[in-house]
């Protein structure tokens, strides 16, 4: 079930095609127009609640013309996908991003082209991808005190798992049945997730919890699942990441979102998340206890990322200090 009104989305798609047919009937080449919601961090600011929002001048009008040779494939791809999305919504069925690509490999050329076209369609229709009945294979994992119904109506118990329960692709279809967890722990890497699971962190007496990992940079399904957990369970959520610029950025993705140009991106945020560490400022205190392989020198790419984070609107003073510490690691 779409979180937006399916009937209105179908109607918007029909209007899209109607406007295109009108242009063609008049002998004109059709043009796809949409608003691009931010291209750089300078297009965003923090609102009073500490959430990212677009500045008024952060919206730019974009055009894709059938009359431009370099735009023909992209134009036709969007039109074809629009038709497929309408069928999915009308029939109340789902399709995976990968499935869409393989339905016409010659037209799309690459999976990335399909992904980009879908992002553009979310901007055209002004709805998030999860409202178009299009899913993506989630890479995240869950473990701990949580029982939910998946999209097929099957009960999933996250407590008794060997390596973690995969985040379901159709998060909007799941129903959270029960949880005795006192908090949610978001772990950056799969290796740390598995180690904590083997150490029975979810079973600590008096402090039952739910663990979730995006296996590095989280995908949309993992971020959406975490957001849904926090909204339903109303319990604290904490983040544990590496003490480097990438760890800081991953925590920021959960808390603030990203500047990815697709509709609904900024809605997949958990502003309540608290960063437990590991803090870059703490590394020097424990460096003598750390194995040599745990200390990796920063690359130029890492340092550039740190500078980029410092110039973002979602970098409060406390985080700014930690980012500065992360730049000093050698």
Image: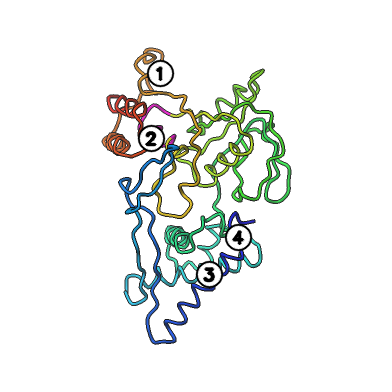
Q: Is residue 142 magenta?
A: no
Residue at position x 32%, y 29% in the image: 320
Which of pointers 1 and 3 lies earlier in the amino acid sequence? 3
Which residue is the site of mark 3?
A: 13
Which residue is the site of mark 1?
A: 291
Residue 318 sits in quarter: top left
Return the x and y of residue 192 as percentages of the image width and height: 51, 28
Question: Disc 4 vs disc 2: which is toward the camera?
Answer: 4
Residue 7 sits in quarter: bottom right
Q: Is residue 314 left or right of residue 16?
A: left
Q: Which residues are magenta?
A: 242-251
Q: Secondary structure at mark 4?
A: loop
Q: Is residue 67 left or right of residue 230?
A: left
Q: Which mark is residue 5?
A: 4
Q: Secondary structure at mark 1?
A: loop
- Asked whether 240 or 58 is in front, the reply is 58
**Quarter in which the N terminus is drawn:** bottom right
- Asked whether 180 or 116 is in front, the reply is 180
Q: Marks 4 and 2: CB-CB under 8 Å?
A: no
Q: Residues within 10 Å of mark 3 (few under 14, many from 20)?
A: some
Image height of 12 relative to 254, above or below: below
Q: Which mark is residue 149?
A: none
Q: Is residue 328 left or right of residue 295?
A: left
Q: Secondary structure at mark 3?
A: helix
Q: Which mark is residue 246?
A: 2
Which of pointers 3 and 2 lies earlier in the amino acid sequence? 3
């Amino acid at each position: 079930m779409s979180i937006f009104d399916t009937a209105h989305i179908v109607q918007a798609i029909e209007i899209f095609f109607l406007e295109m047919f009108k242009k063609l009937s008049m002998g004109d080449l059709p043009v796809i127009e949409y608003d691009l919601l931010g291209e750089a961090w300078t297009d965003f600011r923090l609102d009073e609640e500490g959430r990212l929002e677009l500045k008024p001048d952060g919206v730019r009008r974009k055009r894709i013309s059938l009359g431009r040779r370099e735009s023909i494939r992209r134009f036709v791809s969007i039109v074809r996908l629009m038709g497929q999305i309408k069928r999915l919504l009308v029939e109340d069925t789902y399709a995976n991003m990968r499935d869409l690509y393989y339905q016409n490999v010659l037209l799309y050329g690459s999976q990335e082209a399909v992904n980009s076209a879908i992002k553009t369609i979310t901007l055209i229709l002004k709805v998030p991808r999860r409202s178009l009945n299009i899913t993506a294979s989630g890479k995240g994992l869950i473990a701990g005190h949580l029982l939910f119904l998946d999209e097929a109506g099957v009960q999933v118990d996250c407590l008794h798992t060997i390596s973690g329960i995969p985040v379901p692709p159709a998060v909007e279809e799941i129903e959270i049945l029960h949880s005795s967890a006192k908090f949610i722990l978001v772990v950056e890497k799969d290796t740390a997730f598995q180690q904590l699971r083997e150490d029975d962190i979810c079973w600590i007496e008096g402090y039952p919890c739910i663990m979730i990992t995006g296996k590095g940079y989280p995908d949309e399904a993992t971020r959406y699942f975490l957001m849904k957990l926090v909204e339903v369970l109303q319990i604290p959520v904490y983040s544990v990441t590496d003490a480097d610029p990438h760890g800081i950025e991953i925590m920021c993705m959960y808390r603030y979102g990203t500047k990815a140009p697709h509709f609904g991106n900024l809605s997949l945020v958990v502003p309540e998340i608290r960063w437990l560490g590991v803090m870059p400022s703490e590394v020097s205190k424990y460096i003598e206890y750390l194995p040599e392989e745990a200390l990796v020198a920063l690359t130029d790419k890492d340092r550039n990322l740190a500078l980029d984070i410092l110039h973002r609107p979602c970098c409060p003073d406390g985080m700014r200090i930690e980012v500065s510490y992360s730049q000093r690691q050698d």
